[in-house]
Amino acid sequence: MGILLSKVRVSNFRSIESMAIDLGIENLLIGQNNTGKTNFLRAISIAVAGVTDITENDIFVAQGERLDKTKKAIIDIVFKPTDGNGEVCREFSEYWTYAFTESWISTDIDGSFVGIRTVISYDVLRDGYVTVRYRITKWGDDESTTTVENTRTPFTDDMRSFLQTYYMDANRDIVNDLRNRKSYFGRITSSHDMDDNKVAEIEKQLSEVNELIIKNIPSLQQTKERISAIGKTMGTDSSSVEIEPLARKLSDLNKGMDIVMQDGAAASFPISQHGSGTRSWISFLTLAAFVENQNEKLKADDNAEQYFVLTMEEPESHLHPQAQRQLFDQISRFPGQKIVSTHSPYVVAQSALGNVIHFSKREGKTTAIRYIADTQDDQKIFREVINTRADLLFASAIILCEGITEELALPIFFREYFGCAPFSLGVNIVGAGGKDGYKPFLSLSKQFNIPWFIFGDGEKEAKNSARTAIRNIYNVDIKKVALPNVIMFGSGDDYEKHLVHAGYTDIIIQSICELEEDDEFFEKYMRTHHGNPRKGGSIRNYWHEEGRNEALIDLCHERKTKYAQNIASSLVSQSDKSKRVPPTVKLLFSALATKLGVGNVSSEEVDE
């Protein structure tokens, strides 16, 4: 490849007021919808490829701001030289030195680079927005400390030819590409390397085949004679109208071409009769074929090099999980730099953490953060989070709870409190498992600035686990500083004890008996287990004032996963709406609502 687009800085462009990102060979843009990933890809296309269809809608306008035509958008990019292994090095190759020329190459303490500032501004004479490129001679920490030549520096033909960007959006469809000469399919099927004599011979044969088809199909012959009369009607006896069952010119082959796919022993069907996923996938593969063809042409010149960057939106659209993995594997082998946006946790799980760039939007402004690799924790984060719960990276907030019971019950209480499922607000509820379970989730949340909450047991060991994880990741001691996003049960309670101590004993017993289809189930449990040792060794004694509650807690602990959802459903179904959500759960949801800027839909006020 020889060069790498290593830095991109954007200001006042669409939803991006100010943003700077370092890029590598492979870059995965993730985040919720409408966070600015497409805008970032668009900015790269403008800066690298010189896209010219610019409008006032490309200028960032803050809430309540009126667009001033003196306001400009700026996109700064830096190309660095790379060696044969794709690693950044100090000097450009002879080829790229020739292509960029001394007009564009600058040098700093890290070596040579090509910095390009693209300014989008309003042009009075053209009554529209235009782009102008300038050479960056010194890359600073921000736009104001970056040195740019005052005079406009023209792009050479070599720079235009060899800085190639290939963009594919989420709506790509090979059926549309088949008839579009400007598509990658149209371009590769319309190009050839044959000499003129061979082209003339083939096109003569195509014309003869056309005539043969028309001659032998009476309806086509009759139609041809009928529509040929248009020449006389228009007063031009020499004009003619032809029917072309097949393209007569090699450059028009794509117009009559189709793709037929056969599934096993089934009949063959045109690609237009296959699903959107297959059609989208084949559209990408035609791009890969086009780029491969371009590379083959370059091989004829031993000194030639070319830079490719693929900017792609949601390649996983319409594909099942295994197909998503296969497609991303093919994208990874694309011969150039890749900048790909995705909403697929399966795609994220296939990429290295260091390739991930997380996009979010705050108050209408796009922000982006690249994951900073940490060899000490990366393997654990990938193993315990990314490999199985990569959807967390798309969350608006994460609730980390102690275990499976809370993970099963909280979504039911959530729907009662907020009037919708957690995913409707972009909230993920995760059983972190206690002990060291919090740490990988907190590390990832900190890296990508994803709001988090801990909903934990009040037992000493559980509190210490949360305290240690928060102190290690955020350098905050929750014993000294109270955090509103850390909600823990009081008096050494866990979830089950909290429900019993909050006065839900009768409704829990009723729920269990209904589930077990035995009205005497709980009473039988007490009689059967009284006097038996618990797991920790203590002897059960249920024949005293609090014995009934103790027995219920023991039973719930023993059958957490079986009872959790049923008990929660019973609680939210009771007539007293103020008691449908347990007190500490209310505290959690109240803090979450404040963070997300939403309210609860309960008809009763949350009584703390």
Image (tube, rainbow, N blue to C red):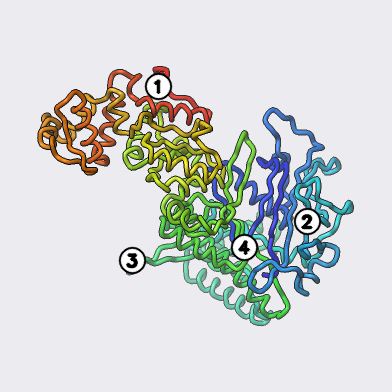
**Residue wearing tag 1:** 602
Single out the mark in the foreground, 1 or 2.
1
Pinpoint residue 579: horizontal percent, then vertical percent: 33, 21
Quadrant assignment, res 581: top left
Is residue 272 positioned above or below 530 on the image?
below
User: Which type of secondary structure does the marked residue at label 2 adopt?
Assistant: strand
What amino acid is found at the position of numbered circle 3 in the picture? Ala
Amino acid at pointer 2: Ile
The amino acid on which the numbered mark 4 sits, given as a three-letter code, is Ile
Give the foreground label among 4 and 3.
Answer: 4
Q: Residue at x 58, y 45 (%)?
A: 359
Helix, strand or loop status at disc 1: loop
Q: Counting residues from the N terminus, which is met first, the one under dot 4 or under dot 1? A: 4
Front residue of this view, candidates 457 and 169: 457
Foreground mark, 3 or 1, reads: 1
Q: CA distance from mark 4 to mark 3?
A: 41 Å
Identify the residue under disc 2: 116
Counting residues from the start of the chain, the first of labels 4 and 2 encountered is 4
Which mark's residue is nearer the viewer, 4 or 2?
A: 4
Rendered view: 96 above or below 604: below
Which residue is depicted at the point 53% across and 32% down?
481
Mark 3 highlights which residue? Answer: 266
Q: Is residue 366 above or below residue 140?
A: above
x and y, in percent, of residue 222 in the image = 51, 62
Q: Is 151 positioned to the left or the right of 229 in the image? A: right
Label 3 sits on a secondary structure element that is: loop
Indicate the amino acid at tag 1: Ser
Q: Which residue is mark 4?
A: 25
